[in-house]
Image (cartoon, rainbow, N blue to C red):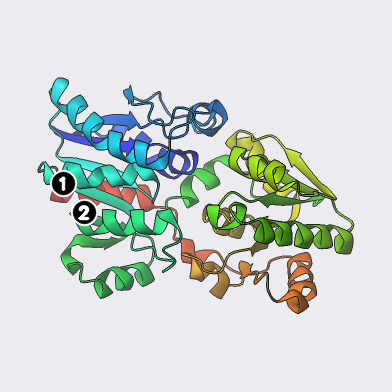
């Protein structure tokens, strides 16, 4: 009997890993141990998703995301906590799986140094913008991993370009397809009664002028479409709004919500303004256009397939054209995300190779 440990800590990763969790729990050839790092300590960002996604409670919660903790404090404490937990509970994993690019994946470094086998799901993704902490996290995890599960052949090529051995890389498709297919009513076309906005990246909220420009653009979207803008409340962004004394105009802050409710909120959107990476994937399946106020993206396929458009805040003359594109609705394919069998492919690879 093999032992597989999964380490997860933030809302999007619970969603992406949900079908893998379920299949590992049901597999008769392995014992699955789920460690929640607690990076997201808010119930709305972690706990409620166990219910929405029908995920069991984690075996262990490390609670690294207590209020007031800085990124470096999370990163410094996580590796030793996982190593001590494994040793104290006599857990000898055949592989430890991480997903994505949150602070949690940096625990892969001390774990690899201690001789553990590491697998990274969502490997090979690159924005080439190292202002993003996530870009550094994902690169580091890729280079210490024994197994790299990439969503797309483009990501395989990016990993190869950095000198990663091809024998470690497996193209499996995107894990977001399965949970969305299971939870969303894909026949529901939505009311299209609002514009949804999600701004939470430091590259945006840490700069007053940039955040102000995003809000000006959002209000322009509202004026042009006659639709209100509903902005998800993220603590760091709310803090920046107060600090900079910004005028929201027609932007209405709304509370965070469970995943099922959030899917419906996306479906009821005319279009979405978001700096989230995941927001370039889920709306592609739901056929909702996304405007991305960032300089770079780690998901260029979304732009290439006309699911999203990048917003250059310095090019005000292009605003009307982008709003018109988003207002017309999305008619492009989401096939670049995969065929919805990613969790099965990953389990088969693990069964045959660990």
Work out whether 158 lies above or below 60.
Answer: below
Can I make out residue 173 in this image?
Answer: no
Q: Earlier in the sequence, mark 2 or mark 1?
A: 1
Q: Residue furthest left?
A: 115
- Image quadrant in which the N terminus is located: top left
Task: Locate residue 202, reporting x and y percent.
Answer: 54, 52
Residue 307 is left or right of residue 225, and the answer is left
Residue 136 is left or right of residue 29, and the answer is right
Can you identify the residue that label 2 sits on?
Answer: 145
Helix or strand or loop: what does disc 1 sit on?
A: helix
Work out whether 296 lies above or below 63.
Answer: below
Can you identify the residue that label 1 sits on?
Answer: 112
Distance from disc 2 to disc 1, alpha carbons, whole Å, reads 8 Å
Q: Nearer the viewer, residue 116 or 342?
A: 116
Q: Residues within 10 Å of mark 1 (few under 14, many from 20)?
A: some
Q: Residue at x 54, y 26 (%)?
A: 43
Residue 272 is left or right of residue 27, and the answer is right
Work out whether 207 lies above or below 296.
Answer: above
Task: Locate residue 156, reporting x and y percent.
Answer: 31, 68
> Residues at badges 2 and 1 in contact (C-beta under 8 Å)?
yes
Q: Residue at x 75, y 56 (%)?
A: 215
Helix or strand or loop: what does disc 2 sit on?
A: loop
């Amino acid at each position: 009997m093999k032992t597989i440990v999964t380490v997860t800590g933030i809302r999007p990763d619970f969603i992406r890993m949900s079908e893998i969790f379920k299949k590992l729990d049901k597999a008769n050839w392995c014992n699955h141990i789920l460690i929640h790092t607690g990076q997201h300590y808010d119930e709305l960002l972690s706990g409620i998703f166990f219910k929405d996604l029908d995920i069991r409670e984690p075996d262990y919660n490390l609670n690294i995301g207590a209020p007031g903790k800085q990124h470096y404090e999370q990163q410094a404490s996580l590796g030793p906590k996982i190593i001590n937990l494994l040793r104290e509970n006599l857990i000898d994993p055949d592989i430890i799986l991480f997903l994505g690019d949150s602070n949690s994946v940096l625990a892969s470094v001390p774990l690899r140094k201690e001789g553990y086998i590491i697998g990274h799901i969502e490997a090979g993704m690159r924005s080439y913008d190292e202002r993003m902490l996530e870009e550094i996290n994902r690169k580091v995890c890729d280079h210490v991993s024994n197994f790299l599960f990439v969503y797309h052949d483009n990501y395989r090529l990016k990993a190869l370009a950095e000198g990663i051995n091809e024998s470690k890389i497996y193209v499996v498709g995107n894990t977001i397809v399965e949970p969305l297919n299971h939870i969303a009513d894909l026949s529901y076309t939505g009311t299209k009664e609002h514009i949804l906005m999600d701004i939470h990246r430091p590259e945006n909220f840490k700069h007053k002028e940039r955040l102000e420009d995003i809000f000006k653009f959002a209000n322009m979207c509202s004026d042009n479409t006659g639709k209100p803008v509903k902005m998800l409340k993220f603590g760091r962004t709310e803090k920046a709004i107060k600090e900079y004394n910004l005028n929201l105009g027609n932007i209405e802050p709304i509370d965070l919500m469970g995943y099922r409710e959030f899917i419906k909120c996306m479906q009821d959107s005319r279009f979405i303004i978001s700096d989230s990476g995941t927001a370039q994937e889920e709306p592609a399946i739901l056929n909702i256009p996304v405007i991305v106020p960032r300089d770079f993206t780690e998901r260029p396929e979304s732009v290439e397939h006309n699911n999203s458009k990048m917003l250059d805040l310095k090019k005000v003359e292009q605003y009307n054209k982008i709003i018109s594109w988003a207002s017309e609705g999305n008619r492009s394919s989401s096939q670049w995300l995969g065929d919805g069998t990613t969790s099965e492919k990953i389990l088969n690879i693990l069964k045959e190779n660990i």
